[in-house]
Image: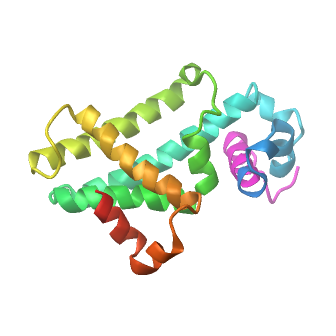
Amino acid sequence: MSATTYHHGDLKNALIKAGVEILASEGLGGLSLRKVAKQAGVSHAAPYSHFVDKQALIAAISTEGFKQLYVQIESVYETYQEDPETLLIETAWAYVQFALNKPDRFKLMFSSVLEKEKEYAEFVEISQENFSQLAKIVEKCQQAGILKSGASDVVAVSVWSTVHGFTSLLLEGQISHTVLEKASLKDLLVLIL
């Protein structure tokens, strides 16, 4: 085992980290438990002590991503909860920043690559917590008259769809450079909200 890549007692996190590194360098097609083991500096059988297959690894990588996103959005909520308009903008901006800083993980988190996602309880739980967090923010904005009234979960889907669509366009390089020269990313985001 390589002391520089794996530290005893933290195999699961070392494997997740290795998986993220492989995603960043090779994409999803390059991700395998064997490659993750090699990247982490452990035997090719070692990942099976935590992941029964590649799907379980994908679930773990996505779960960790959703945990990180939750922490970022919760920090925004704590900072701006008394200013709903800024809260909405900064929440959307944190989402965009997360995607831009971790594009491979972000794409995996929101892809259909994870089959039978309901079989991964921790993934389901953190996904639901992220959505509940957004609904809570939407409710604050509705109470302030910034967003339309209605069921907060329905309005949350609308807001999320808008911000996610914008983020996806950014990640795929689909926003014209002429538009990007006229306005900052954050200014564009504010316009769509």
Total labels drawn:
0
- Does any portion of residue 180 appear in the rendered image? yes
Residue 15 within the magenta-colored segment of the rendering: yes
Residue 50 visible in the picture = no
Quadrant of the rendered image containing residue 21: bottom right
- Residue extent of the magenta highlight: 1-22
| Residue 13 vertical placement versus 119 (above, below) | below
Where 93 sits versus 64, above or below? Answer: below
Picture coordinates of residue 137 (x, y %)? 24, 46
Q: Tell me the residue at 64%/52% (across/down).
A: 104
Between 43 and 71, which is closer to the camera in this rendering? 71
176 vs 111, nearest the viewer: 176
In the image, residue 61 lies at what x, y percent? Answer: 63, 41
* Residue at the bottom extreme of this rendering: 181
Residue under the image location 40 percent in, 59 percent down: 94
Describe residue 176's horizontal placement relative to residue 28 as left or right.
left
| Rendered residue at 62%/36% (across/down) | 60
Visual colour scheme: rainbow
114 within the magenta span: no
Q: Quadrant of the C terminus?
A: bottom left
Residue at point 80% right, 60% down? 4
Rendered view: 159 above or below 113: below
Please tell me in which quadrant of the rendered image residue 76 appears.
Answer: bottom left
